[in-house]
Image (cartoon, coloured by chain):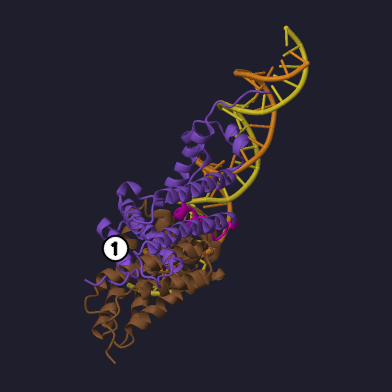
Chain colours: A brown, B purple, C orange, D yellow
Amino acid sequence: MARPRTFDEAQVLRAVRDQFWNKGYAATSMDDLMQATGLGKGSLYGAFGDKHQLFLKVFDAYCVSSVEAVKKTLEGPDAGALERLRQYLLGVATASAAPSNRRGCLLGRGTAELASEDAQVADRALETFQGLEAAFVRCLEQAKAHGDLAPQADPRKLGAMLLAVMRGLEAVGKAGMDEASLRGMVETAFEGLPAPAKRRR
Amino acid sequence: MARPRTFDEAQVLRAVRDQFWNKGYAATSMDDLMQATGLGKGSLYGAFGDKHQLFLKVFDAYCVSSVEAVKKTLEGPDAGALERLRQYLLGVATASAAPSNRRGCLLGRGTAELASEDAQVADRALETFQGLEAAFVRCLEQAKAHGDLAPQADPRKLGAMLLAVMRGLEAVGKAGMDEASLRGMVETAFEGLPAPAKRRR
DNA sequence: AGAGTAGTGGACCGCGCGGTCAATAACTTT
DNA sequence: AAAGTTATTGACCGCGCGGTCCACTACTCT
């Protein structure tokens, strides 16, 4: 029909995402985005709309892929479910403490900066948090079914609590807290999970 | 010696703090600050330096007073220590869920926006997190001494974990998660604390 | 080949940004 | 009362912001 695009949309969105991720929304200028993507302003506006729409687009994509990634990571048989979750959260702890990851996660950053004044961001973030929680809950249900949690354990409550711990990791990680402390938080939270009654010997 | 100031410094800093708190650092303009404080630009610059210094000043004050406030709130006899901590965190949960508090806490907001690129902010934030953690730990030590925690409980680890939960509350609260969920997270975390052995009857 | 259409790049717009400065005001000291 | 010092105001600066527009290009369709 007409002239085709010369850029790869996914690649451009990745570049945009990284900019917002590194500098935040307000501190990122359209010129930053032009430079990061290599596109002219007209192309960016033509293809994605203004700065706000562009942010929403990458934020959305980030949220979706985050939840998907977590679900995939936690997928597996009932047997190792609890340990999978534990390892996942320990990984988050390590990642949150890494100096290279000082920017934190886009979800946390975007939410902190914009959610209070941008309902769309808040909605998307809430949905994402609930998605993550749901993935945790499923994993905990598997663990319970397999007998790694006490019968009276409430996976929904535990999942919510672990979500809070996870978001907390990111928050304190951004301040530069050391890896051992962050991992310790995860370990301690897991030690508090209701263990099944010990088998008689 | 010379002309005295006509403004109350504490009051001005409070106004500045609220601006940064409501809109974030980058999104707050010097004009916003002029309007909020009622001062001219020259006065602001003369008294406090540039925007960044001004932010650091209010951020510092906020951090100091936050830690102080928590310490004061948690102060008291060994007897009610655990319950005081519980009530405090439940209060944080309720506050974090309140629509009027959607802006979150300045510590969280400032850290998320600036810590990755501003070492001073990161340092201050880390110090503050550690101060909060220390207050929790002290409270947990009291609780342990009073027998509200098991003898093998490690107050330092538990305090760190509760700090993570607390920061998590704020993070998910900003996305608009409901109060019941947030309070549930606190309850669940507390249910996981190592209880003392039940007394024989 | 010509017409039609969508993509591209960058010049351009007006505004509001962070920050400076000089004229003036309000005080203390001698 | 005069001199010295600091606070205050707001005009002013140059720049970089988000956003628009248009001449030009590269393609498809007839």
The residue positioned 47% from the left and 51% from the top of the image is B67
Q: Decide which of A199, B89 is in the foreground and name it.
A: A199
Q: Secondary structure at mark 1?
A: helix
Q: Magenta segment: does it hold B116?
A: yes
Residue A66 location in percent, x, y?
A: 38, 72
Q: Locate residue A86 relative to residue B34 in the image: left or right.
A: left
Task: Mark yes or no: residue A6 visible.
Answer: no
Secondary structure predominantly adopted by residues drawn in magenta: helix
Q: Look at mark 1 in the image and give the residue it sits on.
A: B187
- Mark 1 belongs to chain: B
Q: Decide which of B24, A27 is in the foreground and name it.
A: B24
Q: In terms of image quadrants, where is residue A89?
A: bottom left
Q: Amino acid at mark 1?
A: Glu
Q: Decide which of C1, C23 is in the foreground and name it.
A: C23
Q: Locate residue A189 relative to residue B29 in the image: left or right.
A: left
Residue A63 location in percent, x, y?
A: 37, 68
Q: Magenta segment: does it hold A117?
A: no
Q: In terms of image quadrants, where is residue A125?
A: bottom left
Q: Is residue A37 above or below residue B16?
A: below
Query: Magenta stretch?
Result: B106-119
Q: Is residue B175 above or below residue C15?
A: below
Q: Assess disc 1: are there few (<14), some (14-19) or many (≥20) residues with their C-alpha within 10 Å of its C-alpha.
A: some
Q: Give the position of the C terminus of chain B as an image quadrant.
A: bottom left
Q: Is residue B185 above or below residue B42?
A: below
Q: Locate residue A37 relative to residue A122 in the image: left or right.
A: right
